[in-house]
Amino acid sequence: MSSVALPLRERVQRAVRALDDVPTAPGWNHAELVELLGDGPLNKAAVLVALIDRGDTIDVLFTRRHDDLAQHAGQVSFPGGRIDASDASALAAALRETHEEISVDAALVRPFGYLDAFETISSYIVTPVVAWLDPAYRVTPNPREVAEVFEVPLAFFLDPANRRLVRMNFRGRSRELYEFHHGGHRIWGATAAMLMNLIVRMESPA
């Protein structure tokens, strides 16, 4: 059976790396970032790609950062952040950061895999943790960091008509980036790139 013909939940679970297959450096976009930034050391971070199975749809959880933050102000992102020395793993960091940012209890999160590691222009290498989030979850956004929490159906991102390829300049070099627009939100940058990694993995032959 073609992977595209499988139920969406099964397609996602087949597409991601297993929990015992933790991604390591370099990131899948390493060649592009080396060209832009050089081959310097990278900080480690982790994000939670939380999926909510609502029966008739599978949604993806996002946060929107406050407009007055020093970095990435107003941008849409996955919950997550820097991996601290006290974190046992990237998975532990993603769960801790998610709780700190939006107060989601780790007991409501069921991790089942990873996407490929991703390098950012802010000199991070990010481990994306993919998990099922209990549909009954509730959030309390950290008022210092998060302005909004919202969901978008995964099917929206899988539709090629909803993907925009845009060109931007960074340090005098031209880059092509994907972005998505949904419900007044612009989803771009590292978040859109990680979504594209999921999409590519889902669309690849099993």
Image (cartoon, helix red, strand yellow):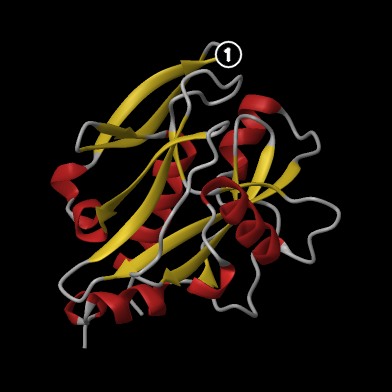
Placement of the N terminus among the 4 image quadrants: bottom left
- Residue 173, compared with residue 24, is above or below; it is above
Residue that badge 1 annotates: 171
Quarter assignment of residue 135: bottom left
- Residue 125, compared with residue 66, is above or below; it is below
Look at 66% across and 57% down and name the residue there.
Answer: 96
Quarter assignment of residue 61: bottom left
Placement of the C terminus among the 4 image quadrants: bottom left
User: Which type of secondary structure does the marked residue at label 1 adopt?
Assistant: loop
Q: Amino acid at mark 1?
A: Arg
Look at 68% across and 48% down and name the residue there.
Answer: 45
Quarter assignment of residue 138: bottom left
Look at 28% across and 61% down and name the residue there.
Answer: 59
- Residue 106, compared with residue 103, is above or below; it is below
- Picture coordinates of residue 159, whole percent (x, y): 17, 53
Look at 22% across and 82% down and name the residue there.
Answer: 6
* 23 to the left or right of 55: right
Residue that sits furthest to the bottom in the current view:
1
- Picture coordinates of residue 5, whole percent (x, y): 17, 80
In this view, the residue in front, 43 or 89, is 89
- Residue 79, compared with residue 92, is above or below; it is above
Residue that sits furthest to the right in the current view:
85
- Picture coordinates of residue 11, whole percent (x, y): 31, 76
- Picture coordinates of residue 89, whole percent (x, y): 74, 65
In this view, the residue in front, 204 or 114, is 114
* Mark 1 burial class by Cα count in 10 Å: few <14, some 14-19, many 20+: few
* 134 to the left or right of 153: right
Residue 135 in sight here = yes
Residue 112 in sight here = no
* 56 to the left or right of 42: left
